[in-house]
Amino acid sequence: MARIELRKRGPIGEIRLNRPEVLNAMGREWPEDMLGAAREMQNDAAVRVVLLTGEGRSFCSGVDLTQLAAGEISSEWFHRTELAYRALETLDKPVIAGVQEYCIGGGLQTIIACDARVAADDAILGLPATKEAFIPGMSGFRLPRVIGMGWARHLILSGENIGPEEAFRIGLVNRVVPRADLERELERWAARYLEVPRPSLTWAKRLTNQAFDLSFEEFLAEYGRAMTVVLASEEHQAARKAWKERKRGR
């Protein structure tokens, strides 16, 4: 049985964490499994939107503490895990996480590398690493970009868990739905992104990924290059034609 399962339904790809017997805890093979999954989704031109989900009761309970205590997870594992998060974050396709029950530690770090997050009403989110005497990865780099420094510091330094409504209030998740509706809501979000032409979606994501890293002048230059590509695309030409036809029909 695959520890991370890949599914494809037309233009929608799904990366499903598949260790439900341990609440999808991240074992020693997780970084390479996730890197491989992200690579496959990136390289499949037919896939335009990616869902990230967890099999069974919970989305992900973080690092496998049994393996960690047994010395089966080295410091190199944490480095490789950050590379896996980055692979998700830099996919040229929107990645939408669907979260049920536990989404803590590495589980939370995984979803903040995604473009959108939909939570079930039983979700439990947090970064307990500081309470367990280690550091919650590079969440100090990524989480402030998602929810702002104030709430990011509180979650990181306190190690406290929060519920879905508070997560929605602070911008950690984009939507909260009843547990029974989670899969349907993910499909609805995927459908929204599928309505957007691929070139503009791809370049908009690339630009927003650089939003906190570039100066205004550097970002302006990147934006100019992106617009050159997008304006020359077949999709943009088709959109222009549609505008003209709508105008003539008035």
Image (cartoon, rainbow, N blue to C red):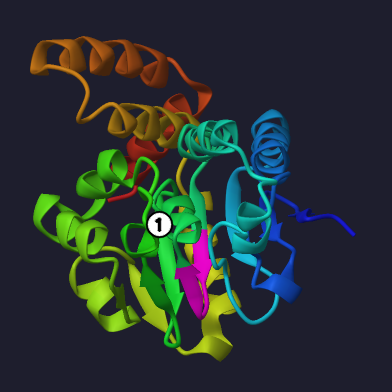
Q: Mark 1 — residue?
A: 116
Going by the image, does 22 lie left or right of 246? right
Dominant SS of magenta comes to: strand
Q: Residue furthest front?
A: 70
Q: Is 224 included in the stretch rendered in magenta?
A: no
The residue at 33%/66% (across/down) is: 173
Q: Is residue 241 above or below residue 190?
A: above
Residue toward you, 16 or 186 = 16
The residue at 42%/37% (across/down) is: 201
Q: Amino acid at mark 1?
A: Ala
The residue at 47%/20% (across/down) is: 233
Q: Is residue 216 above or below residue 12?
A: above
Q: Is residue 29 above or below residue 227?
A: below
Q: Is residue 51 above or below residue 236?
A: below
Residue 133 x %, y %:
36, 56
Callout 1: SS: strand
Region of the chain picked out in magenta, as a range = 97-103
Q: Quadrant of the N terminus?
A: bottom right
